[in-house]
Image (tube, rainbow, N blue to C red):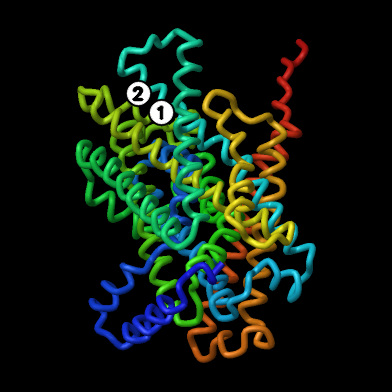
């Protein structure tokens, strides 16, 4: 993949990075900002329907209290991606081959398989979120709310438009350096527009600064029913299995190597951590300001993103906030849809050991396109159950693999690190692995076990005989 980049340009970029290593902090940041890219793709993938629903539920259920959860969750996820980045940038080797040789071929195959399965199945809710928002906008424009044929027509037209846009931008990614740069620019501005949409809503509803500070820095756990499950599930599953496959290949596609390690860490913080925390926090604040009821003290599983959008209309006295929030949710879905397609393009070629060509990459990007049906129909029950069982089981295994390879001196050499910094980083990786295990167990119970074997309601107590 790196051969598609001009070698002279790569050498000039590496020389510039070496110069920036010794430059003042402000100059280094300005230089790095021009070169970021792969972490924007991670940000777009994680800022999808799942993040939207989780943030809406957190804000509607507990107000500002759980603002600290998403930063902690993403910090632990970034730790593991930084370890994976260190492995790939230090060796320059495609991770699928490295996993197969250094660990076991079955681990590499299952990692790739889980990435494709997760991308295909989790494609449905992205279109579901976008379709619901499109239909909400259509009703504001005068579409008859009780007409089912019109509803389906609007949703499928919107879904077809989003799919066409996604194909255009993801196929650009496979067309060489210019297409890659175009795609990354598309994601940057898409995420920025999403942030502006939710910022507008928050500014319209106001911010309770005291509660904001407490929400971020006091790490409170609300006493309501289901709060601990919500927290652990969010922390353990902030990074999807398909994100771990996409990240290293997006760096290799840019020709990144040893000299890009500092840039990659900056990219993760600036392009993934900050956008994710900003967007999810803005959604939580908007929900806390509009629909949060302190008297309930329970998880509001009945809340959906569209309920949040409609609640703003009555609060603000106009439909502007509802329109902006709908557009924000559509933007979140579009970013996730395109990145799901990109990861399938990479993964398909690796699994079948095919050399990368634009034609092969483009064919594999169409694997999740069936998810467009999600604009009007939820996926069959077995599909999310299968995806959860495979992806969430393998995520902790993938994390352990990153930990092992990142500490394997025979493989990485000096890139393993030395001194006091190695200890805290390993401790953070172990914490991420533990939370991934707990979070995955919670998600598997709710998404697989409880659906396959629903808990029986307690038997009614019979009155005692007189």
Q: Which residue is mark 2?
A: 137
Q: Which mark is residue 133?
A: 1
Between 2 and 309, the one lying in front of the other is 2
Question: Horizontally, is 196 left or right of 450 in the view?
Answer: left
Residues at marks 1 and 2 touching, judged by CB atoms closer than 8 Å: yes
At horizontal 71% and vertical 53% (from top left) the residue drawn is: 113
* In the rendered image, the vertical position of residue 28 relative to residue 53, given as above or below: below
Where, quadrant-wise, is the N terminus in this rendering?
A: bottom right
At horizontal 44% and vertical 72% (from top left) the residue drawn is: 264
Toward which corner of the image does residue 374 lie, by quadrant?
Answer: top right
Between 415 and 71, the one lying in front of the other is 415
Q: Is residue 109 visible?
A: yes
* In the rendered image, the vertical position of residue 42 relative to residue 149, given as above or below: below
How far apart marks 1 and 2 lie (CA) works out to: 6 Å
What percent of the width, then of the height, locates residue 114?
68, 52
Question: Horizontally, is 32 left or right of 240 in the view?
Answer: left
| Number of residues whose C-alpha sits closer than 10 Å to that of mark 2, classed few (under 14), some (14–19) or many (20 or more) | some
What percent of the width, then of the height, locates residue 280?
38, 48
Between 162 and 420, the one lying in front of the other is 162
| Number of residues whose C-alpha sits closer than 10 Å to that of mark 1, classed few (under 14), some (14–19) or many (20 or more) | many
Q: Is residue 261 visible?
A: no
What percent of the width, then of the height, locates residue 228?
53, 48
Q: Secondary structure at mark 1?
A: helix
What percent of the width, then of the height, locates residue 47?
44, 48
């Amino acid at each position: 993949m790196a051969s598609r980049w001009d070698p002279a340009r790569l050498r000039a970029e590496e020389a510039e990075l070496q110069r920036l290593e010794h430059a003042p902090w402000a100059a280094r940041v300005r230089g790095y900002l021009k070169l970021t890219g792969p972490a924007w793709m991670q940000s777009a993938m994680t800022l999808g329907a799942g993040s939207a629903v989780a943030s809406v539920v957190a804000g509607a259920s507990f107000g500002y209290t759980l603002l600290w959860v998403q930063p902690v969750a993403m910090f632990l996820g970034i730790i593991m991606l930084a370890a994976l980045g260190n492995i790939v940038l230090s060796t320059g080797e495609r991770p699928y081959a490295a996993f197969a040789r250094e660990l076991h071929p079955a681990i590499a195959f299952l990692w790739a398989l889980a990435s494709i399965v997760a991308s295909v199945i989790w494609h449905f809710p992205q279109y579901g979120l976008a379709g619901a928002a499109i239909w909400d906008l259509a009703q504001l424009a005068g579409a008859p709310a009780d007409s089912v044929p019109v509803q389906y027509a609007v949703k499928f037209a919107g879904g077809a438009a989003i799919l066409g846009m996604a194909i255009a931008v993801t196929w650009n990614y496979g067309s060489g350096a210019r297409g890659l740069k175009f795609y990354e620019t598309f994601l940057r501005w898409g995420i920025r527009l999403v942030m502006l949409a939710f910022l507008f809503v928050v500014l319209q509803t106001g911010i309770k600064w005291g509660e904001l500070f407490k929400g971020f820095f006091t790490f409170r756990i609300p006493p309501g029913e289901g709060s601990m499950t919500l927290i652990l599930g969010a922390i353990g599953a902030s990074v999807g299995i398909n994100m771990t496959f996409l990240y290293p290949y997006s760096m290799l596609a840019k020709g990144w190597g040893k000299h890009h390690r500092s840039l990659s860490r900056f990219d993760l913080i600036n392009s993934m951590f900050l956008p994710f925390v900003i967007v999810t926090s803005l959604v939580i604040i908007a929900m806390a300001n509009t629909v949060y009821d302190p008297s309930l003290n329970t998880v509001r599983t009945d809340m959906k993103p569209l309920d949040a959008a409609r609640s703003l209309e009555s609060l603000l006295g106009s439909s502007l906030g509802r329109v902006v929030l709908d557009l924000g949710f559509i933007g979140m879905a579009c970013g996730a849809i395109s990145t799901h397609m990109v990861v399938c393009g990479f993964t398909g070629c690796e699994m079948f050991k095919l050399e990368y060509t634009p034609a092969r990459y483009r064919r594999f990007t169409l694997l999740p396109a069936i998810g467009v049906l999600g604009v009007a129909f939820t996926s069959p029950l077995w599909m999310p159950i299968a995806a959860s069982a495979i992806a969430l089981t393998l995520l902790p295994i993938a994390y352990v693999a990153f930990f092992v390879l990142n500490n394997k001196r025979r493989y990485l050499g000096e890139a393993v690190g030395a001194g006091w910094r190695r200890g805290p980083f390993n401790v953070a990786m172990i914490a991420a692995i533990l939370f991934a295990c707990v979070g995955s167990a919670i998600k598997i119970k709710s998404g697989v076990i409880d659906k396959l074997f629903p808990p029986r309601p307690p038997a009614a107590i019979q009155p005692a005989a007189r």
